[in-house]
Image: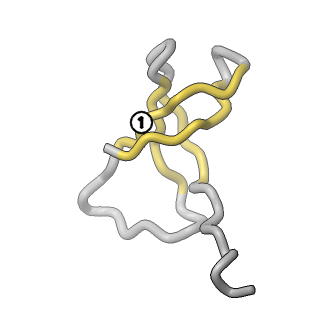
Amino acid sequence: MATERRFCDRCMARTVHDMIEDPEAIYTYKRRRIYLCKECGHKSMKRGLRPSAESVY
């Protein structure tokens, strides 16, 4: 599972989230993913973070 620091709606802070992956879904940048907060266990659907484009410059 991938972990990211995301804003949790229940904790009202940036916490570590696990991304719950769906094997049947094709993930693109704008597709909503299911995230699980490790602090409170709240599940939420959020868009993925933008990929970094620093290598382009």
**Relative height, residue 56 to residue 36 (above, below):** below
The image position of residue 16, as x and y in percent, is 52, 29
Instruction: Please tell me whether residue 38 is drawn above or below residue 4 in the rendered image.
Output: above
Where residue 10 appears, as percent x and y from the top left, is 64, 16
Q: What x and y, as percent, mark residue 15?
A: 59, 26
Residue 41 falls in image quadrant: top left
Relative vertical location of residue 50 with respect to residue 12 in this rendering, above or below: below
The residue at 54%/34% (across/down) is: 44
What is the x, y in percent for residue 11? 65, 15
Judging depth in this view, the residue of 40 and 22 nearest the camera is 40
Residue pictured at 57% horizontal, 68% vertical: 29
Residue shown at 57% from the left, 56% from the top: 48
Decide if residue 23 is on the left or right side of residue 56.
left
* 18 sits left or right of 57 in the view: left
Residue topped by disc 1: 18
Image label count: 1
Residue at (60% x, 65% y) in the render: 30
The quadrant the N terminus occupies is top left
Q: Within 10 Å of the Cα at label 1, are there few (<14), some (14-19), or many (20+) other Cα atoms?
A: some
Q: Quadrant of the C terminus?
A: bottom right
Q: Nearer the viewer, residue 5 or 7?
A: 5
Q: Residue furthest left?
A: 23
- Direction from residue 54 to residue 44 in the image, left or right: left
Q: How is the image coloured?
A: secondary structure
**Hey, what amino acid is under mark 1?**
Asp
Q: Secondary structure at mark 1?
A: strand
